[in-house]
Amino acid sequence: MAWLNLAAVVNSTEVEGPGTRTAIWVQGCLKRCPSCCNPDFLKVEPANVVDINQLKKQIELNKSHFGIEGITLLGGEPVLQAPGLSELAQFAHSIGLSVMLFTGYKLEELKENKFNGIDKLLRHVDIVVDGEFESDIIEQNRNWVGSKNQNFHYLSERYDEAIEPIKEGVITEWRIDPEGVVSANGIPFIVKV
Ligand code: SF4
């Protein structure tokens, strides 16, 4: 059985990539960017350890319930869990969903194959947004990215740069779960209050 160590999941969101998506934040990052938006997700320690097969079922359900067009992988640092995420991304592609990946590493570094399983993960990713978050150059014109140094890379024909400019609409979502916990996600953070 394979597992993923997750920090958070939002089953249906419209502010973490094109269309409606399931967003999956993994736990653990080796970088320490000043003003990291998700500092609780940095420690490499067990958080919410999830069976990948369960997650696949959840994604399939989200496709039929919410009509999601894809999944988005964020963190923490997704590439540290590339073997498990590549299996998840392959599954997402197999049922017609797209895959978007946010990483603090540059795509060139990922292509050097320093991370176990990264080649398979990149084969099943449509969009990579790469680079560390830099709080002194906040991005205000492009969708979903935190800072101006971060770049979109299109690894398949499914999307192109037409998705990048902010046009109109909501960029942050707020929700209340059945226990009354309020949370928000969007550019570029996820919080619980
Ligand atoms: S790479 Fe991302 S998650 Fe990691 S410290 Fe930098 S901003 Fe935070």
Image: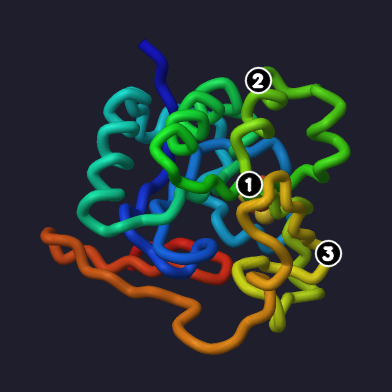
Q: Secondary structure at mark 1?
A: loop
Q: Residue furthest left?
A: 178
* Image location (x, y in percent) of residue 95: 39, 37
Give residue 113's position: percent from left, percent from top. 80, 23
Query: Crowdedness of circle 2 by 10 Å Cα count: few (<14), some, many (20+)?
Result: some
Which residue is the site of mark 2? 117
Q: In this view of the protein, which residue sits in the foreground, 65 or 23?
A: 65
**Mark 3: few/some/many CA within 10 Å (<14, 14-19, 20+):** some
Q: Residue at x 46, y 48 (%)?
A: 71
Could you tell me which residue is drawn at 32 percent across and 41 percent down? 59
Q: Which mark is residue 126?
A: 1
Q: Nearer the viewer, mark 3 or mark 2?
A: 2
In the foreground, 147 or 168: 168
Which residue is most to the top?
Answer: 1
On the image, the x and y values in percent for residue 146 come to 67, 67
Q: Quadrant of the N terminus?
A: top left
Q: CA distance from mark 1 to mark 3?
A: 20 Å
- The type of colouring in the image is rainbow
Label 3–label 2 contact, CB within 8 A: no
Residue that carries the numbered disc 3 in the rendered image: 149
Give the amino acid type for the residue marked by disc 2 in the picture. Gly
In terms of depth relative to the viewer, which is nearer, 43 or 165? 165
Query: Would residue 188 be found to the left or right of residue 113 on screen?
Result: left
Is the distance from the Cβ of mark 1 to the nearest ligand 1 atom less than 8 Å?
no
x then y, percent, for residue 158: 61, 53
The reply to whether callout 1 and callout 2 are in contact (CB within 8 Å) is no
Image vertical order of residue 76 relative to residue 182, above or below: above
Alpha carbon distance from label 1 to label 2: 16 Å
Q: Residue furthest bottom?
A: 168
